[in-house]
Structure formats: C-alpha cells, structure tokens
Image: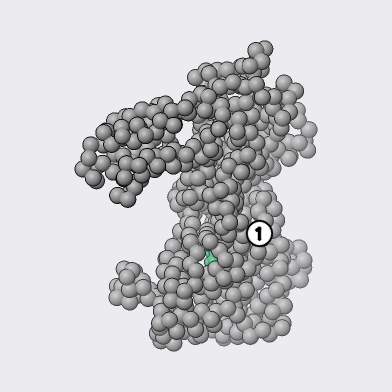
Amino acid sequence: MPLPFNVATHLDTAIRAAAKALGLTDQGFESEVRVADPANGDFQANGALAFAKRAKQNPRALAQQIVDLLGALQTDFDLTLAGPGFINFRLKPAALLGWLQAYGSAQDLQNGAASARQGQTWIVDYSSPNTAKQMHVGHLRSAVIGEAICRLLAFSGAKVIRDNHIGDWGTQFGKLIWAHKRHLDPAALATDPLEEFERLYKVGNTAADADPSVLEEARHELVRLQDGDSTNLEIWKEINDVSLAAFQQIYDQLGIKFDVTLGESFYNDKVPRVYRELSESGLAEESGGALVVFHDEHPRFSRNAERPNPFMVRKGDGASGYASTDLATALYRAENFHAHGIVIVTDFRQTDHFEQLFLTVKKWFAAKKYRLPELHHVIFGAVTGDDGKALRTRDGGTIKLKELLGEAEERAYALVTEKTPDLPEAERRTIARTIGISSVQYADLSQNRSSNYVFSWEKMLSFEGNTAPYLLYAVTRVRSIFRKASLNPAEPPVGSATAPESLQEISLARKLVKFPDAIQLATNTLRPHFLGLYLYELAGEFSGFYAADKVIVDDAAVRARRLLLCHRTLIVLETGLHLLGLRTLERM
Ligand code: ARG
C-alpha cells in the first residue's frame, strides 16, 4: 500500500491512535505534526513535548512510549527521538518511490487533494471594482489573490462560486447622471466610453463642489434613479454595461471568469429585511434617524468608545449604504448558495468595516437561528513604488491596469527577443504575453499578502530569484529534457523506475512529497505565497539534481528512475503554477 497523498495527515492519524492507546487523548493531546527541517527528517511531531510540559511528565519518556506504539510506520519511515522529546520521521527511499508512483498525473494530485473540502460551497468575493471608473493598479491585488484562492479552494474539493460584487449603486451616479444629461460628448463616448464617463464624473464633481444647487440636482438624480426613473435607469445601465465590458478585457488577460456578478444594486430590494430583522432582534437601534449597531464588547465599536463608530445600517436620511448592502449580501449568500464559507478579498483599509460586519452577522444569525458560514476577510497591503508611496504615473496620476498589463507584455517581448531572437515573431509574442502577465501576477502572489509590496519591473521580470520567469523557465527546462529525448511527457517511460539513490535524487523526491503540505498551508491560511515559496524551492531542488545527475543515460534503470523525478517535478510545478492562476509554457 503506497502512502496516502498527504503524508503528514497519515502520521497525525497514527500518532493520535497511539496517544489514544496511552489514554492521552482526553487530556488534550495534539500530535503537532509538521514539515521538518530537511536536516532532521521529513516530518516531526512536537506534541509529546508540549503535552508533557503541561502534564509535568518527562517528555522524552513520553515520546518514547509513543514511538514504541508506532511500529507499523517503520516500513516507510526511520523514526528517531530528538532533543527534549521531538519525534522525527524520515521517509525511506522505497516509500518515496511508492508515493511518486502513486501520484503520477495532474489528475492524481487533484484527486489526492480533493478530500479536504468535498461537499462544501465557498463564495469568493473578489476584484469587485466600482463601475464608471477604469480599474487601476490598486485593483490588481484583489483580482490576482482572489483568483489564486478560488483555485486553491476548488483544488481541495470545494465548489467555488466566483462572485464579482461590483459597486454599481453608489452615490457617484447622482453626479454622473447630472453631467451625462448636460455635458456628454458623443464622439468621445464612441471612442472610449469609460474614459468619457470618468471625465463626466469629474465634470459633475467639480460643478457640485462649486455650486450647491448642482449638488442638490445631483442628489435628485440619484433619488430618481433609486425610485426607478426610466431615463436614469437607462443611463445607469449603459454605464454599467460599458464598465463590465472593459473589466472583462482585463479578466481575460488574467484568466478570470466569474460565475456571478451580483453587485450592490442586486441587493437594493433586500435591505428592508435587514432593517426589520436587526431591529426586531434588538441588535440595531435608532440614533438621530439612523439605524446603527454597537458592539459593546469591542473597544472601538462600543458605544463607550472614545470616538463612537457604530455600524451604520441605515443612514440618517433613510438611505442604505455599504453596511446595509453587505449585510443583505451575507444573508443572500448563506440562504441562496448554502455557503459553507465566504471569502471577501479587499484592501487592508476595509478591516474595520468587515470586523463590524462579521460581528453583526454572527449575532444576527444567532438570533434568527440561521446557519452561519465561515467568514473570512482576506486583506492585502498597498502596491507601492520604490519610495514606499502608492504607485503613481510620473505626473502623479493613477496607473490604469490596462496600461500596466500592456507594458508588462511589451517589456517581456523585449526580453524574449533578446534571449531568443531566432524564434518567429508570432511565437515570441505569445511567449511574451504569458511571461508578462505571469510576472505581474506572481510578483504579487510571491509576497505575503498582508504586507505592502514594491512594484519593480526589474525584479519581477528577472530570471533569478522567486519570480515568474524563473519558475516558467524551470517548467520549460524539464519539458526540454523530454523533447530532446523524443519522449512524450504525457506518457513518461518510468514503469521500471527504482527508488531514488543519489543525494540529489533523494533530496528532490523528498521535496516532491511535500507538495500536499504546501497546498494545505496556502489554502488553510488563504495565503498563496506559501505555495509560491514551495514551488521556488522545488525548482531549486530540481536545478541541483539536474546539475549533478545526467538524466538520459544508457543504463535503463537509472534513466527511468531519473525520468520519474523529472516528470513528477513537471506535474507538480505546472499544477502549482496553474493553482496560482499562471499560465505555463512548453518552451521559451
Ligand atoms: N467595491 C468595493 C471597493 O471597490 C469592494 C467590494 C468588496 N466586497 C464587498 N462585499 N464589500 O472598495
């Protein structure tokens, strides 16, 4: 029997059984299995140490008692007791071979991983830009990180619903419609409609700032829209349609396809129920005409806070807002999609909003006995220039995403042309498109998302370091081994492969077996950079192996053994990069 896909889980099960036999389970024993420092082994279990400390027992003796019950693991692992009471597990070469043979295709990897969230539905709310404006560089992270999270969740077996929660019902429409009726330039509308809407918004905004009567008229336009006035609805719809078509071009470049686009306007008729239920259950209270929710257990959202900052469920003028819509959205997702989990990906500046939202939803659902989904606000930091300030164009404007992605392709094209001038132009273009977009995506995904990240063309397009070009190149290098030997990587001749032998073979095999841990870590923490780091390290292991051990040698057994490692590296690298939302190349 080969080892299960996730070796750490297998060890956890065995150790828990041993702990149970020793009567430790009821006393809160945890196995604490994790990936070990390679010098010590493949996995280590720290649970005996933590438990013995609490129970005032001798940790080494306890660890030894556990080891004595793990005899069945000796077939696949060398077990050692280390330090004050760690148990180290080192996979034997035959066990490494068994695992590599058992998971021999991208589909096998998927099947292996797909048990964790089988039967669960997850809603991922990402990208979610406001309409009537172009997407700028600030919109990149939500789209890129959100898509990687969708793919990771789906890989672990969940049904994922990608929901673009566009801001299509904001107060911007008052000024916009006001200006649209008076200052529309039909020629500009025909050439670049989104550009024209942005101009109109500025016209409306400037006019409203200068003249209170304009502001008043703009407010009326908004009220008319909300009351269903047909002219205003038509303008509103035109603006949204144009915006969505422009967004779609960017989504196509990034490989994103939403299942639903349920923006703020969709929830317009669903907010009265929120007002009613929050009032009935005593969660919300009237305050100067507004309906607000305080959370007295929270220092900043309590009514006794130094600067009271309640969750504004309904504004003083009776209008709904961001809070009301998001409350209605949470209920709709729970009821309509039976969501097991909801993930919302936005900038860190919305932390307070979502903290208040989640606190309110938890109390509301408890009061109404609605089933509460897992709620996750996935935040990310800002994209900055070298100076640490928000990235801007030279003249201080915002950088449009469309232009940024275009520049990425152009820069990649220059690079590809420099490296492989002999390839036909069309092929260089295709390669450049993948390298350019992947570099932008991966520059973002290789960072811990909570930090700000410094946007640097030089770094992201470098063939050295944890970059997309480096990883894409690693893939093409493995592919070229097969190509040069006239072998089809879809059907690698590895049936007669024996267990890894050389230092580098073993080291690479040990890294491959840890793919499930990287996936699990990235998925459970909703932090794709853990997967990126793993792939980078795997590519490094492969380089070490390839430099030391020639693959296409005469000895058939050695060749099969090394081809097996090449092939498994290929499927793990490609699967991992696709999970991050990147496209890969056959050659470059
Ligand atoms: N439209 C918002 C913005 O541009 C993001 C929406 C995120 N999703 C949500 N359910 N609030 O900042």
Is 563 above or below relative to 118? above
Q: Residue furthest front?
A: 21
For image coordinates 62% across by 26% down, the residue present is 564
For image coordinates 60% across by 57% down, the residue present is 160
For image coordinates 35% across by 32% down, the residue present is 67
Residue 436 in the image: state x and y as whole percent.
64, 42
Q: Nearer the viewer, residue 569 or 108?
A: 108
Q: Which residue is mark 1?
A: 258
Q: How many marks?
A: 1
Mark 1 CB in 8 Å range of ligand 1?
no
Residue 232 in the image: state x and y as whole percent.
68, 81
Q: Please identify the quadrant where the N terminus is shown.
A: top right
Residue 181 location, quadrant: bottom right
Lateral position of residue 106 relative to residue 14, left or right: right
Q: Nearer the viewer, residue 266 or 422?
A: 266
Residue 464 in the image: state x and y as whole percent.
55, 32
Disc 1 element: loop
Is 551 above or below relative to 188? above
| Residue 389 seen from this side | no
Q: Please identify the quadrant where the C terminus is shown.
A: top right
Is 381 above or below relative to 287? above
Residue type at tag 1: Phe
Q: Nearer the viewer, residue 136 or 363?
A: 363
Lateral position of residue 361 relative to residue 164, left or right: left
For image coordinates 26% across by 33% down, the residue present is 61
Residue 131 in the image: state x and y as whole percent.
63, 67
